Image: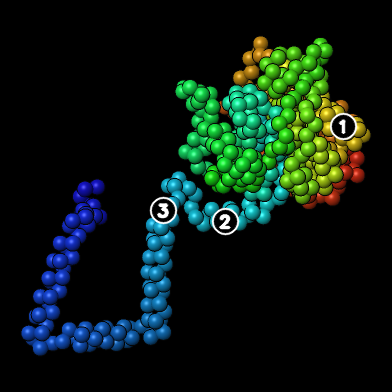
Amino acid sequence: MKDSFRYRLETLMLPGLKRWIAIILLGIAFIVLGVFLLLGYHPITVSGLFLREVMEHAADVLPHRISGIIILSMGAVVIYIAFARLMSSILGAYLPEDRESIPDMLYRRHHLDRGPKVVVIGGGTGLANLLKGLKKYTNRITAIVTVGDDGGSSGRLRQELGVLPPGDIRNCITALAEEEKLVTQLFHYRFKSGQGLEGHSFGNLFLTAIYAITNGDMLEAVRVASRVLNSCGQVLPSTLTSITLVAEMVDGRTVQGESQISNDGGQVSRISSTPVAQAVPEAIRAIAEADLIVLGPGSLYTSVIPNLLIKGIPEAITQAKAKKLYVCNVMTQPGETINYSVADHIEAISSHAETEPAMTKKLLQAVLVNDQTPSNLESDAPCAPVLYDPERIQALGIVPIRKPLINESVSSHHDSGKLAEVIMLWFFKRKEDNEFSDKAKTVDLSKKVATFF
């Protein structure tokens, strides 16, 4: 308000006025000093006598101990307010206005840094969506990402420059980033025109540039990009070998390339990769040290299973002591999982990991299934909700967990917050209760899980 005292005071403090106000006050001080000297009073002596009388009168009203405590408290409050304003001014120059308060940020960081070690394996938008929710519970996240993409911007960079497809890696890095909206939007920005630029995303080009600067070291390029975005956890390609996915279709045809498989429209029978690739050692180490391993969500044959085709990863998962969970997709996917049930998804994963049916529970302990009907599903849609078949799931030695997990705005996808919450709840319940062990009977396990959810 223009009539308020604060507004008038701030107006007086405008640049150009402050110096003249200070000069006027200095002039008044000289006048007062001159008057005191003319009357024969020394200003310092008079001021000392005045303060002494004030303190003596204060001591008559309040004991000196109480007076001392009051004065000390006032000094402490003044120092605290000044220090708080000083730190706010300094940090305000570096932190965005929409950032959470500094105490809240420090408190959250302290607990997230002590959270469980979580390894998430997959690719595509499903993996990035899950990471957005998980980072609210722990900073010790490792995302192991498939590198079989050969379409769009990633495919062009892979073909022209020989770089590993950066698209899924970029999505995971930005998903794990702090809430720096402008930077995240920048990495997702896709050029709509320009010769050679049209269709490319800035994040893909950025990763490719760092890849060149680091002499073709993709792991280092990912680390640098993560530091730029202040991402929590780490993102790792499942392999540093450039692989090509090869699908055997139900009708006997063979289709090569992830983009071709997704667009073919046929039904995948089995998928493989060429050449045979070795896993990144950091990925094997992360799996071995993990407290929780999550597979999916994501396209079954082009996002989740390709990681299990990498030599060393399936073996590391089966040997790991971590809790192991598979997140089944909400909907079936044309060309990959039409008419698939939850058990069909699990059997495909077990088969491609070359795990014996009786040993499937070494690869997975539980499967998380959506229990919420999509609201805006069209009757003639090519996809449908994944069929829930608990008897077949339990026969495989897997515990089914059903919870409403749909995003209300996009009902064909998981809600990242709901999904992460259920996963972490399951993990902590499993950790607390010794009855949730690999030696327990499947039926008993499912009954116990049902009591917790």
Tell me: 68 left or right of 420.
left
First of labels 3, 1 by sequence position:
3
Q: Nearer the viewer, residue 234 or 71?
A: 234
Q: Classify 10 Å Cα crowding around label 1: few (below 14), some (14-19), many (20 and above).
A: some
For image coordinates 42% across by 47% down, the residue present is 97
For image coordinates 12% across by 75% down, the residue present is 30
Q: Secondary structure at mark 2?
A: helix
**Residues at circles 3 and 1 in contact by the CB criterion of under 8 Å:** no
Q: Nearer the viewer, residue 309 or 127?
A: 309
Q: Which mark is residue 92?
A: 3
Q: Nearer the viewer, residue 219 or 298?
A: 219
First of labels 2, 1 by sequence position:
2
- The colour scheme of the drawn protein is rainbow
Residue 11 appears at what percent x and percent y? 21, 53
Residue 374 to residue 24: above or below = above
Name the mark nearer the viewer: 3 or 1: 1
Q: Which residue type carries mark 1?
A: Glu
Residue 83 to residue 194: above or below = below
Number of marks: 3
For image coordinates 39% across by 60% down, the residue present is 85
**Residues at circles 2 and 3 in contact by the CB criterion of under 8 Å:** no
Q: Which mark is residue 107?
A: 2
Q: Which residue type carries mark 3?
A: Gly
For image coordinates 48% across by 52% down, the residue present is 101
Spatial CA distance of label 2 from label 3 is 19 Å
Q: Secondary structure at mark 3?
A: helix
Q: Classify 10 Å Cα crowding around label 3: few (below 14), some (14-19), many (20 and above).
A: few
Q: Which mark is residue 354?
A: 1
Residue 67 to residue 330: above or below = below
Spatial CA distance of label 3 from label 1 is 55 Å
The quarter of the displayed image where residue 382 is located: top right
The residue at the far front in this view is 215
